[in-house]
Structures are given as C-alpha cells and as structure tokens.
Image: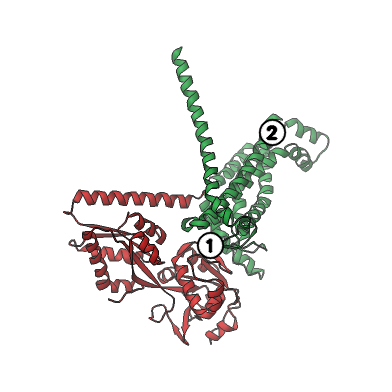
Amino acid sequence: MNSRKITENILSVSTATLLITGVAVFGFGCNGKGRQKINGAGGSFPAPLYQSWCFDYSQDISHPKVNYQSVGSSAGISQIKAGTVDFAGTDAPLSEEDCEKSGLEQFHMVSGAVVPTVNLPSLAQSTFTLDGDTLADIYLGKIERWNDTRIAALNPGLTLPDLKITVVHRGDGSGTTHIFTTYLSSVSEAWKKDIGIGTLVKWPCGIAGQKNPGVCNNVSRIKGAIGYTEYTFALEAKLQIAFLAVDGKTVKPDEAAWPILGKTYILTRKDTPADKMSAMADFFSWCKQYGGDTARRLHYIPVSK
Amino acid sequence: MRRILDTDTAFRWFCKAGAIVGLAVAIALVAVILKESMLALRTAGFSLVFSAEWNPADGSFGAAGALAGTAATTLLALLMAVPLAFAAALFVNAAPPNVAVPVAHALDLLAAIPSVIYGMWGLFVLCPLLQSVLSRFGIEYTGFGLVPSSLVLALMVLPYVSAVMRDVLAQTPVALVESAMGVGCTRWEATWDVVARSRKAGLLGAIMIGLGRALGETMAVLFVCGGVSAIPTGLLDGCTTIAATLANDFAEADGVHKSALFALGGILLAFEFAIQATTIPLIGRRSRK
C-alpha cells in the first residue's frame, strides 16, 4: 500500500533489533571491561548536533561510546518507553503526566531557530522583512499578494513583485510546525483562536510538503512561495530567509532576539542502572560545558551552563 | 502405485493450503480494518464521509475532501489515458511487427517504472513546468493539485489499460473486420462502430483495471497533490486523495485519528473490491465469445 512507510517500519524494526543485539552483546560480552556504550535515538532536528557531540566526546577513549540515531521524535519516544535506547531526543516535550506514567525524566538540551523562507527572485539580494502579525495573516490567507500594503510598509525602498503568495506548510506531523504555530499563536489573536498550536493543524490555505526537505523543495520551486523550516535546512537549501521585525527593529535568525525558537529535549529512563546513569550524566554535562561552540557553529543555541 | 497416490495427496493438500492461506489473509485483512475503524465509525459516524473538516488537532475527521480528490483525480486521469490507450492498442495491433513490437515493449516498460519515480518526475519536472507554462498565459498557479496529480496518474495507468485493450482487440474475429470493410465501411467506422462495439465489455474491463490502479495510487500523488484536505472546487486547486492521506498521516496517528485512517482504508478496499468484482466477468467474457 505504501512502500516508503513499510520500508521505514522494516528499517526501524531492524534498527531496534540491531540496537538490542548490540546492547546485549556489548553489555554481556564486555562485562564492564570494554568501553561502556550509550545509545540514543530520536528527533532529526537536533541530530547533526548530537552526532557531532557524540563523535567529539567518544574521541577520548576513557569516555563511554555514545551513539545517536536520527529516527524522528515520535519513534524516539516509543523506543525510550520500550527501553531499547538509553536516551531519546524529542522536539515536542512530553507532558508531565506522560513522563510520570512512563517513568521518564525530561530536560531541555538546546534550542534552535525556525525561519520563514521565501522565493522572491527579484528580491534575492535585498533584506526582506516581515513581522509576526503579517506572517500570521499570510498563513491565515488574509494577505494574498506580495505587494500588499502591509508588507510594503515593512519594506520601504523595496519594489515588491505583483505576485500571488503561495503558502507552503508541513504535511506530516512535525515538531517544527509545533514551534512555528506556537509563535504565530503568540503574535496573532486570530491565529490563536482559529488555528492554535499543534504538530498537525488545519491550515486555512496553502499546499503541503513532506518533512523539512519537502517544504524547502516546494518553496524553491514555486515563485512567490513562503515556507518555514529549521534554520540549518534553510541554509543548506540556500533559500532566502525573511527577517522579522521585533519592536520596530529587524532581527536575523543568528541574533538573540530571534522570536521563533524551539526547544529540543532529552528523555531518560528513571530505572537506568546507576553506572550507566552516571556515564550519561557525564556525557550531558560534557555537552553543556564543552559543546557550546559546536552548537553555535551548527546554528543551535546551547543551554547556558 | 502407492507412491503416486501419496504425492498426489500431498500435492492436493499443498494446493488446498495455498488457497486457504490466501483466503484467510483476505478475511483477516478485512477483519482487522473493520475492528480498527470501529472507534472512528462510532465517534465520527457519517461525518467521516460527508464532512470536509479534516483536523486531527481538534478531533474532526471528515474525509469528504479526500474522497472528492480521489474521485476527481481518477476521473480526469481516465479521461486522458483511455483515448490514448485505445489509440495505442489499435496502433500496436495494426502496425507491422517491426514497428509494433518496440512500441508495445515501450508501453509495457512504462508499467515497470516504480511509482515513486513518477512522483519525483511530477515534483521536479511537471509541477514547475505547469507553473511556468500557465504563467505565460497570465494564470498564477502553484503547479500542485488536481492537474499534475491526474496527469501523473494518466501516465501510470496508460500501459495497463493499453495492454488489456491490446489483448481484447486482438480477439476480434478477422471475418468481422473484413466484412465491415467489405460493406464499404471506412477504417474509422470499421474500428469504432464494429470492432469497438463488439469488444465493448472487454474494453470496459480494461478501463476498470485503470480505474482500480488510479484509485489506490499513493506515492506519486502524494508528491504532487499539494496535501489540501478541502474539497477541490476548480481545476487549479490543491487536493489530496484517500491513499495520500493514509501515507501522510499514518506514522504519527493514534487513537481516533488512526482509527479514521483505517476506516478510509476500508472505504478504499470496498471500492477496489467492487471494481474487481465488476471487472472479472467483463474481461472473462471475451474468451467465451
């Protein structure tokens, strides 16, 4: 019926099996003598950072060997609940009750920016600015053309094209959508009332793309399109980023005042054996202490020590 | 003597087992779909089919948009594919073998292309092309939705419909064509009024095969439909289909949402079954004539 999902399922089942076998072989085979192994899995958004941290940390052979697999937040949550991994990464936080019920501990690891991206070839070399309210009204379908007076007012001096705005959003459930709709709800009463916050929402207009690359692809292929993605994806896809006016000042995604920020979390099990728990704690505190530069280089915002 | 009997018995049981496994799987499939969709049928009821409000976030599961999208893309695809398939089938049957064979192979090859390739072609080539071509006529179009979905579907069903039509037309008694020509029919009259009419059931069967294939196609449509859950009102609108909705939502769905997806799968299965049930006698009839 759907070969991609089936392949994914087979892949995740085999990954899980491999992980279990791996844990079993190393756990019993090495019996504490070899290097300890810590396995993590979860959201794809922090994966580049976590994997880079794992690599740096594991370079020191006195440290345990840490792995992180990018399988998606939801898959990470089900794996940590099933106990097949030692920690999981998720972009949408679990509720307190859910954590309590499943015996999980959750903490904030890093933040990342979500950015609006646009395809306006005539403005490719210019600084293009929107503000929260305009962005919300574009996504509500209330502003339909790029030369709308409200957009023009934010961009004095630019000649805006007489072009229809094509809204692009995520089709699949996504932590990025959660972050983006949280922002829109905070700046627009109409958005908060009619649409709200969620990983999947009822979009009033626009077309859908599959995952971050799908949204980037649709934006880059449709003239007059606007989309939203994690900052790193926008940079990789070389898309034009719309900056945001906050209190009358134009803010770029690298700046501290950037308003669309998402937190990503780590989940661990409370019943983890003490030696493994302390090894994990060592890894996470190492990340917080020494991982800041790597995080900033990859456009994430580390939690202050 | 005894040995022969034994292998025969074993072989009979083996065949029986094969048949039973097939039947059991089909029954189990229907049972699971029914069981899983009960929750949605109880909570959403008829609004599942009649409401176009699809919003998993607040628990509305009206799939009228996906149903309409499925019907529209399938019909448009058949409108484009059937005449082409009929023409191609006529050509292959009438042309000399050194031309007909390569053409027939090329058509069959179209059926061997995985659907995800059609989807990528649609996304990377067809959608931007539609957008730029229509913009020359002053029409602002995203490039996604009903038009590319049905174009991609038309291409995908073309080889199937054409292959069955080829077989159906090849069964036409030569005497029939010759008599038609003999009484002074033009080529067109002989083809349309005599051959096509006498093969009506088989040709309809070929169309039904295309219909079945277009209804259930998932990946190619998911790429180019735009993922809009509302009922499309114009040709340039974005849309979605049942199969695309299933592919898009299944990974994250749980509770009523997941159940609603199972119910949609059930609806699709019922349609496919009905098509299958009408097609088999139609195609089967040609051998009896």
Amino acid bearing label 2: Arg
Q: Of marks 1 and 2, which one's residue comes earlier in the chain?
A: 1
Q: Report which quarter residue A273 is drawn in.
A: bottom left
State whether residue B141 appears in this view: yes
In the picture, which chain is green?
Answer: B
Q: Nearer the viewer, mark 1 or mark 2?
A: 1
Residue A259 x, y percent position in the rendering: 43, 79
Give the total of numbered labels: 2
State whether residue A44 appears in this view: no
Q: Nearer the viewer, residue A151 or B7?
A: B7
Residue A133 x, y percent position in the rendering: 53, 80
Q: Secondary structure at mark 1?
A: helix
Amino acid bearing label 1: Pro
Q: Nearer the viewer, residue A92 or A6?
A: A92
Task: Indicate which disc residue B273 carries.
Answer: none
Task: Indicate which disc residue B56 carries.
Answer: 1
* Model colouring: by chain
Marks 1/2 same chain? yes
Q: Is residue A59 above or below residue A224?
A: above
Report the residue marked by disc 2. Answer: B285
Please, which chain is the residue tagged with disc 2 on? B
Q: Is residue A99 above or below residue B259?
A: below
